[in-house]
Image (spheres, grey):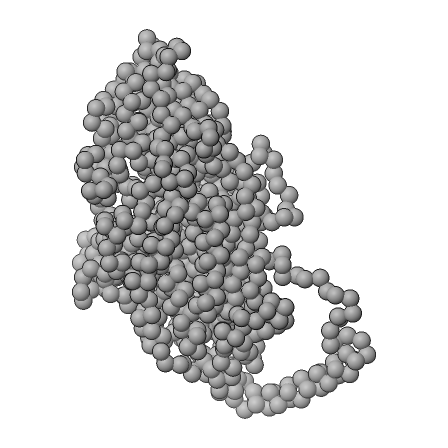
């Protein structure tokens, strides 16, 4: 590719290669290729990740005696005088030059400070990425299972780090945390059976895999134990499902509850059952949701879930290592006792629909409501057992909770102009099985983006801001790798992170782009999608196909595509801690199935059938969908990293806030919201925020672009805006959830609630708490508006 020169004035051309092959000791000196001569010091912004470091602990090597360095002692005094003298003379010259140039900045330096997003760079990045590379990445990633905490996942992390080095990244790290994980015990399989007296009538240990690297299906963090009780069927296990059981006079106390996967997060199903008094839970995937054409039309014939497919998954609330909430799981941090940690309280186990048939047929009580009926052919779908049915379900769980090392790989491309501003792209690496979709379709894309960016760096290009690529460990156990990293680096990220872009199950369907984002990031990703050709339709862009499949306003022919908010559009993933704990604006991008197909996610989600063959035959045979997805991601990252003025639009945030307020009103109209809660102050705060953001966007649009400090101060406001939506003490009882606008709802961690503090309080019928939370939100939004407006220094 062409070597670009516009940013090179005043900046030495970087040489990514030279650095990476040098021995570690040398790298620990300040060894920055290229250095700007003006205000934005890359040293201060960058020193944390300089060099190749196995683990952050290793960075601080003890000093040897007598090696105090050049600047100490008598010899040092002379040197210091010399250096200070040189700096003084240099300062005089610089001062003279500055006085003679625009806004005090010499014009050559000004050019470099104005480095901006460029179409030719964008084109080059697109062209650098190749479908065949993504395909071979996926083939490699899926050739064995790689669950969090395993040797396979560790080896994969080391290889990925080596790849980033080879691609030309300035610095790479392998960052370790020691966290509490949970596995099934191969020698004592979990069993589900039904018994009558001493007789076992049916017994299953689920799938026994021939591949020894595969774990047996289980629910991570389920407590161990053997429980026995009568069975109740609770549909999807939502709050309303349990309410319906109560209405029908069915008591779950002392019983085991069987529920189907789908609609809400599995951990919440278990929690709801425990709250209803149940002593155990069995989860299964119903063909009505996972094999809609019946069990003959399943994988290997089509993409639907076979009869013996079992969905594994964790069932814990919260994020990160369970024993170190709010703090990184590094050696010197104190751990909670397991008994004090927020862990599930009743045993649970997933099974296949082949096995579920046996248990559902045990039920002979009330017939289930029509909308509770699933798709297993020989099952009537009843709710409970009659009094004279003495059969009982017996559930035995033998999981092991163990402390394990997990690893993040962090790769950095240093920014040329603003190295202390970070655009972070992350993907998790661990998978429950082979992970062809979750997360390896994302990892295959991530690696190709890394290669393409590295290729450009090696040709002499450098982004305006620093780009960080992160491969997270142990996401499946509750976004652990990313959360620990955010907790460890929270101050640095609070000050420097522009945005976090997540890619997880990147290609889980082949119909349309699917994006969840902080409201003020929706424009940049829409613009990015306009630049990318649609994988299937010649002459169309990804944007056009997306707008057609998922229009924001379905009645309008030219409607833009819908960007969902992260909390209700995207399953939990590594953006959790970035957005909800640290207030870093985030987005998540993937390609998905037809949104009108009313089934939960893709059918083989988290099962043994997530294989390369499945992806190749049923989702993306030529990997063009992968290519389209990663191009949108790469283009978005480029725009955020390279644009002189950050492409974030706070007016869109304001629009979203107004919509959330009116949604809140509509949703609770039936509950007499207005008699209990006065929303006037909140509405006023939102309108202040709207005005301030509109004014700010106008000021930015007309700002003097020859004044880089002014632009930088506007950019900082855009970058920090979401941070101002945090409440430092978090939601009641949930200190990790500090975002006042978005958070998973207490009762469904997948779907989440806007203004969760208020919503949870209303759900619990606590109007005093609701009032308290409402006032916190109001003050917070007012304060965010003031900051946009420089309200503290303006008169009334
Ligand atoms: Zn995932």
User: Residue 260 versus residue 403: which sits nearer the camera?
Assistant: 403
| Extreme residue in the right direction | 74
Residue at left 47%, top 62%?
162
Image height of 360 relative to 621, above or below: above
Image height of 324 relative to 274, above or below: below
Percent x, y for residue 100? 54, 91
Residue at left 21%, top 34%?
295
| Extreme residue in the top direction | 388
- Res. 93 in view: yes
Q: Quadrant of the N terminus?
A: bottom left
Percent x, y for residue 648? 40, 64
Q: Is residue 503 left or right of residue 112?
A: left
Indicate the quadrant where residue 264 lies.
Answer: top left
Percent x, y for residue 281? 40, 27
User: Residue 684 versus residue 161: which sits nearer the camera?
Assistant: 161
Percent x, y for residue 559? 23, 58
User: Residue 593 versus residue 731: which sits nearer the camera?
Assistant: 593
Indicate the quadrant where residue 87 lies.
Answer: bottom right
Residue at left 42%, top 42%?
213
User: Residue 356 versus residue 203: which sits nearer the camera?
Assistant: 203
Residue at left 53%, top 70%?
20
Q: How many marks?
A: 0
- Res. 794 in view: no
Indicate the quadrant where residue 37 lies.
Answer: bottom right
């Amino acid at each position: 590719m062409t070597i670009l020169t516009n940013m090179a004035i005043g900046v030495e051309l970087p040489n990514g290669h030279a650095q990476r092959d040098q021995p570690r000791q040398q790298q620990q000196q300040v060894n920055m290729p290229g250095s700007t001569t003006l205000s934005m010091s890359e040293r201060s912004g960058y020193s944390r990740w300089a060099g190749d470091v196995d683990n952050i602990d290793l960075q601080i090597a003890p000093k040897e005696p007598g090696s105090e360095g050049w600047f100490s002692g008598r010899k040092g005094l002379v040197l210091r005088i010399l250096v200070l003298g040189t700096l003084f003379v240099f300062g005089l010259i610089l001062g003279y030059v500055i006085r003679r140039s625009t806004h005090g900045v010499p014009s050559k330096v000004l050019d470099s400070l104005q480095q901006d997003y460029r179409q030719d760079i964008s084109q080059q990045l697109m062209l650098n990425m190749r479908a065949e590379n993504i395909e071979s990445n996926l083939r490699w990633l899926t050739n064995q299972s790689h669950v969090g905490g395993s040797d396979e996942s560790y080896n994969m992390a080391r290889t990925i780090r080596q790849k980033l080095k080879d691609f030309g990244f300035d610095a790479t790290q392998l960052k370790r945390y020691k966290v509490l994980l949970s596995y099934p015990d191969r020698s004592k399989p979990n069993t589900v059976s039904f018994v009558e007296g001493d007789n076992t009538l049916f017994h299953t240990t689920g799938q026994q895999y021939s591949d020894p690297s595969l774990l047996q299906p289980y629910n991570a963090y389920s407590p161990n134990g053997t429980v026995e009780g009568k069975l109740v069927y609770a549909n999807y296990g939502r709050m309303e499902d349990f309410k319906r059981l109560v209405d029908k006079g069915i008591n779950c106390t002392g019983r085991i509850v069987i529920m189907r996967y789908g609609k809400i997060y599995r951990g919440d199903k278990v929690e709801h059952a425990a709250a209803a008094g149940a002593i155990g839970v069995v989860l299964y995937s119903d063909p009505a949701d996972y094999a809609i054409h019946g069990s003959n039309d399943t994988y290997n014939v089509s993409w639907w879930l076979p009869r013996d497919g079992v969905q594994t998954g964790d069932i814990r609330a919260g994020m990160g290592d369970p024993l170190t909430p709010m703090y990184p799981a590094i050696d010197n941090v104190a751990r909670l006792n397991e008994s004090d940690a927020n862990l599930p309280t009743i045993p649970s186990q997933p099974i296949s629909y082949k096995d579920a048939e046996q248990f559902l047929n045990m039920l002979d009580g009330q017939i289930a409501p029509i909308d509770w009926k699933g798709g297993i052919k020989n099952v009537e779908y009843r709710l409970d057992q009659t009094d004279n049915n003495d059969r009982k379900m017996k559930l035995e769980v033998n999981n092991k909770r163990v402390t394990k090392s997990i690893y993040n790989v962090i790769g950095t491309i240093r920014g040329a102009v603003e190295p202390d501003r970070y655009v972070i792209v992350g993907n998790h690496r661990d998978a429950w099985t082979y992970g062809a979709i979750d997360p390896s379709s994302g990892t295959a894309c991530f690696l190709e983006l890394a290669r393409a960016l590295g290729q450009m760096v090696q040709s002499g290009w450098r982004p305006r801001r620093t780009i960080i690529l992160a491969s997270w460990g142990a996401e499946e156990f509750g976004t652990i790798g990313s959360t620990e990293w955010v907790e460890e680096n929270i101050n640095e990220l609070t000050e420097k992170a522009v945005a976090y872009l997540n890619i997880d199950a990147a290609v889980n369907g082949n119909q349309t782009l699917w994006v969840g984002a902080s409201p003020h990031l929706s424009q940049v990703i829409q613009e990015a999608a306009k630049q990318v050709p649609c994988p299937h339709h010649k002459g169309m862009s990804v944007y056009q196909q997306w707008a057609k499949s998922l229009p924001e306003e379905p009645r309008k022919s030219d409607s833009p595509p819908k960007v969902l908010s992260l909390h209700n559009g995207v399953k939990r993933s590594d953006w959790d801690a970035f957005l909800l704990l640290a207030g870093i604006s985030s987005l998540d991008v993937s390609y998905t199935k037809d949104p009108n197909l009313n089934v939960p996610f893709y059918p083989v989600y988290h099962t043994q059938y997530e294989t390369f063959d499945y992806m190749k035959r049923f989702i993306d045979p030529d990997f063009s969908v992968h290519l389209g997805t990663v191009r949108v991601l790469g283009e978005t990252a480029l725009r955020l990293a390279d644009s002189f003025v950050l492409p974030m639009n706070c007016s869109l945030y304001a629009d979203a806030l107004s919509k959330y307020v009116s949604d809140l009103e509509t949703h609770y109209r039936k509950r007499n919201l207005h008699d209990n809660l006065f929303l006037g102050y909140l509405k006023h705060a939102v309108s202040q925020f709207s005005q301030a953001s509109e004014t700010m966007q106008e000021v930015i649009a007309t700002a003097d672009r020859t004044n880089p400090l002014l632009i930088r101060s506007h950019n900082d406001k855009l970058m920090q805006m979401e941070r101002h939506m945090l409440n430092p003490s978090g939601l009641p009882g949930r200190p990790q959830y500090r975002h006042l606008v978005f958070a998973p709802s207490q009762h469904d961690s997948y779907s989440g609630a806007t203004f969760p503090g208020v919503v949870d309080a209303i759900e619990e019928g606590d109007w005093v708490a609701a009032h308290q939370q409402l006032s916190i939100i109001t003050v917070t939004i007012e304060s965010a508006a003031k900051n946009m407006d420089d309200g503290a220094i303006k008169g009334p």
